[in-house]
Amino acid sequence: MTSLAHAQTMAGYNRWMNERLYALCAELSDEERKRDLRAFFRSIHGTLNHLLLTDRLWLGRFTGALMKIQGLDQELYADFAELRRERERTDGALTKWVATLSDARLAAPFTFASYTNPQTRTLPLWTAVTHLFNHQTHHRGQLTTLLKQTGRDPGVTDLIRLPGLESVSEARGA
């Protein structure tokens, strides 16, 4: 599998999982979503906000539209419906950006500064893209645990269950 195929597959997985988890979170009351469950970002709502914030940070680095933030726990949207709309919009932007990539571009050097350390770092772009998707998966794993604590079952979240994956693999000759 090429780096491009990996990025495209992960962008699809990201969108699919976010749609599923947001639908499940919509069944919760605002109070349940915002209840402090002692997670990294306190609550389900806090975790959803963190994921959107960091996805936008990375997308901004990738596109040159840098974003200023106050902290990694910053609440972008207190209203769940607005948070969900912005998640969908950001997933669309991420998918659109991934569609502009090539294996050559993914192999090229990418220089960035982290939020906590202004010193720059240069790595192949594919490394940063892989980090973005890995970070999403990490926190969505926490989110599924939080949802289970509220009595909601997120179901199977495995990448290999992504709808249409078989046809994509066949088309790419994998």
Image: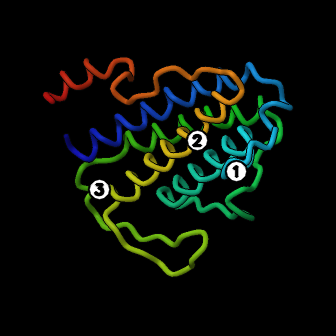
The kind of residue on which mark 2 rests is: Gln
Question: Nearest the camera: 85 or 117?
Answer: 117
Left or right of 50, for residue 109: left
Q: Residue visible at 24% across and 50% down?
A: 103
Residue beneath disc 2: 142
Q: Amino acid at mark 3?
A: Arg
Name the secondary structure under disc 2. Answer: helix
Mark 1 or 3: in front is 1
The correct choice, above or below, for 60 with respect to 16 in the image is: below
- Is 38 displayed left or right of 118 in the figure? right
Name the outermost residue toward the left.
173
Q: Residues within 10 Å of mark 2 (few under 14, many from 20)?
A: some
Q: CA distance from mark 1 to mark 3?
A: 34 Å
Q: Disc number at residue 117? A: none
Give how far across and how far down residue 111 sits, in percent.
41, 71
Q: In the rendered image, which quarter is residue 127 located in?
A: bottom left
Q: Are marks 1 and 3 in contact (CB under 8 Å)?
A: no
Q: Nearer the viewer, residue 104 or 70?
A: 70
Q: In this image, 146 relative to 5: left or right?
A: right
Residue at which label 3 appears: 105
Q: Quadrant of the N terminus?
A: top left
Describe the element under mark 3 as helix, strand or loop.
helix
Determine the secondary structure under disc 1: loop
Up/down of 28 relative to 87, above or below: above
